[in-house]
Amino acid sequence: MKESPLHSLHCRLGAQMTDVGGWNMPQQFSDLIDEHLAARATCGMFDISHLGKFRLLGNGALERLSHDLTANLNSCRDGHCLQSLLLRDNGIILDRMTIFRQSAGNFFLLGSASLADSDFEHLKKQLDKAPLELINETDSLCGIALTGPDSHKVLAKVIHDAELPRRGCFCSFRRGGQRCTLSRSGLVTPDGYELFCPAARGIAWFEQMLAAGAVPCGHKTGEYLRISHGKPDMAHDMQNLTPAEANLHHLCSANIPTSAASRLVSLRCHTPGHPLSPGDTVQTLDGGSVGRITSAAQAAGSGHSYAMAYISSPHTAPGTHLQIVADGKTVPVMVESAEVV
């Protein structure tokens, strides 16, 4: 497995480690309830160095990406970021990507950890003989994400030479002669922040944020945030789906089918003590099978469970009451969203 630039620090902090997309990443640092509370109520901090990170440079970069990705990049101004999809030739999603537009000739792209190599090769093949440079920065950059209402306070204590970006924007600044990027792309939570810096500077940044009050959080807490916010994951939720089936057709500018027999939605179980699990059957209240759970997480402390589920389209309206069959018992759930964001 690959190791993050922060690996030695994670070990010193006593993190339990696990395989995340082929990377040896923190599963949990401390008490899970403490991590969940920090991520929701103060400031939780995550290592996101394992994400695929690429830069496309050169005249024609905008046109090339506009051809390869589903979003309308012409509507994205310099200094802004947006979500898009990378599709196979048959219209199946290859990966969900976050795009940072520095200029029409300079783009930074984030993809899934487990798909970094295939994403890079796919993008590289699309370049043809265009005078463009595609750089794989996955191993050379460290990524740190902050989430929670006190995130801006933590950043204000450690960053004095850059204004905190607005939601959907990013800024670049230099620290110690090296370029860093601070963004608010909604990668982990809608109001969170992300910092990308040279790998060799990652530990210093992480330690400064620890000293400023950030609480280190692992993959378990990250999965809880992802699923409770209705964000699908390539490894668990979106394999072999079209944009419409993944409920992500809103990330496509045009010429993409929007109808689908089944769609991904987020579900919530308000009954404490009934955890949901991938593979659980989703039913209507009269017992008719309409789909299955693809990924699930439980809120530490409250016992409320959340899930992503692939279910028949007629049952995807927000507020629809359904039930899960787990261990021979039926558990009531409700559709939280019909369009996953």
Image: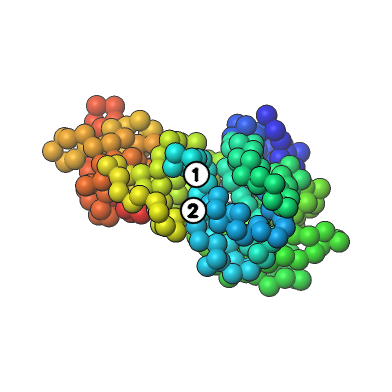
Closer to the N terminus: mark 1 or mark 2?
2
Q: Is residue 95 left or right of residue 179?
A: left
Residue, x 65% and y 57% (percent of image)? Answer: 61
Q: Residue furthest front?
A: 129
Residue 279 vs residue 75, the one in the foreground: 75
Residue, x 76% and y 66% (percent of image)? Answer: 173
Residue 73 vs residue 27, the one in the foreground: 73
Image quadrant in which the C terminus is located: bottom left
Say which residue label 2 marks. Answer: 70
* Location of residue 122 with respect to 80 vertically, above or below: above
* Location of residue 301 with respect to 151 vertically, above or below: above
The image's colour scheme reads rainbow
Residue, x 52% and y 67% (percent of image)? Answer: 75
Q: Is residue 252 left or right of residue 111?
A: left
* Image coordinates for residue 197, horizontal then vertical, percent: 74, 54
Under mark 2, the amino acid is: Thr
Q: CA distance from mark 1 to mark 2?
A: 8 Å
Q: Is residue 211 left or right of residue 240?
A: right
Mark number displayed over residue 87: 1
* Image coordinates for residue 260, horizontal then vertical, percent: 30, 45
Residue, x 69% and y 51% (percent of image)? Answer: 130
Residue 243 visible in the displayed image:
yes
